[in-house]
Amino acid sequence: MPFAPGGSNDIVGRIIADAAGQALGQPIVVENRAGAGGVIGAEYVAHAAPDGYTLLINSSHSTIPAIVARVPYQTVEDFVGVAVAGFSPYVVVVNPQLPADTAQKLVALLRANPGRYNLATAGKGSGVHLGGELFRSTFKVEVEVVHYRGGGPSVAALVSGEAEVGTPTMASAIGQVRGGGLRALAVMAEQRTAALPNVPSATEAGLPGLIHEEFFPILAPTGTPAPVVAALGTAFRGAIQQSAEKLIELAGVAPRAGFETPEQVMNLVREGAERYTAILRAAGIQPE
């Protein structure tokens, strides 16, 4: 897990780890190696022995750190695809004390108070950071971007009021939204999601174009033997199917078919990188 406990990767990975371990006939040890927008954990797996015993459950936005800075591995070439755990939209949330109960009121409040409020991310180069930049650039608002060490810490900052605005993953925010710790103003999708049926889509909320979705590729180091990758893929796809209801209920993550081969998984990662590069460049973010 390249992010802190409580974030979307952590929640999704732990849901499917037990079922996959049962299919493989041995337990899967879940280890969080957080930091640098997922770079630390991804580097560890990229350089691990390609024997099938060390895997990465990453965010679809694993390629973003390489877009904004140099990283010590190749974000596509150093991995081989095993499976895709599912897809989930991000969500626009605010601390409940903020005087904005609709997305349009939030935009008006931020425009009237440039630089006054903090926007929490899960780290520079994370998918949450990308969602925040997409929100900022699309609706021309000025907020102070604050980077935390993962989705869990960023959501905690929003609940405490240390930050007021965020675009967290559905998985990391859903519990606080349901419990009242956060107010959700829109899911960043064209349609509502079954996980939060009372929250409007971005289109319904008056935020056209604010479409931002996460997916969760499970990856092995490049060089892992093809029969090993195939066996892992079979085990994890079965675990994902077995855990589908729990993934939707606890994380707002919906599995999809069509990612049965390593090539299909890595094509998805590669296409995502191209989209994210375009969004970051439009927001004026250049490599450091």
Image (spheres, rainbow, N blue to C red):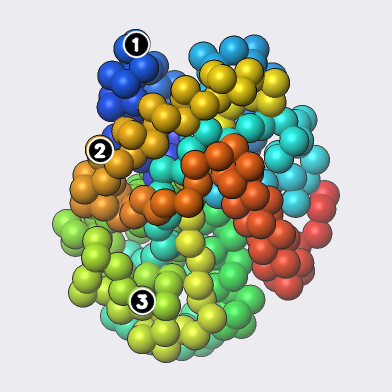
Position of residue 219 measured from the top left corner of the image (x, y, whole percent): 56, 32
Amino acid of disc 2: Gln
Residue density around tag 1, few if under 14, some if 14–19, many if 20 or more, within 10 Å = few
**Residue 254's spot in the image, x, y percent?**
34, 54
What is the crowding at mark 3: few (fewer than 14 residues within 10 Å), some, or many (at least 20)? Answer: some
Residue under label 3, please give it: 191
In the picture, measured across the screen, residue 233 lies left or right of residue 175, that is right
Tell me the CA gap for discs 2 and 1: 17 Å
Of badges 2 and 3, the one in the foreground is 2
- Which amino acid type is marked by label 3? Gln
Task: Return the residue at label 2.
Answer: 242
Q: In this rendering, would 123 be left or right of 165?
A: right
- Is 113 or 154 nearer to us in this picture? 154
Q: Tell me the tag on residue 65.
A: none
Would residue 242 appear left or right of 108 to someone viewing this image? left
Q: Secondary structure at mark 2?
A: helix
Relative horizontal placement of residue 235, taking residue 277 as reference (left or right): left
Residue 287 visible in rendering: yes
Query: Which corner quadrant of the image does residue 26 belong to?
Result: top left
Question: How many numbered marks does the figure carry?
Answer: 3
- Quickly name the residue at label 1: 26
Q: Residue furthest left?
A: 179
Q: Position of residue 278 (x, y in %)?
A: 72, 67
Q: Earlier in the sequence, mark 2 or mark 3?
A: 3
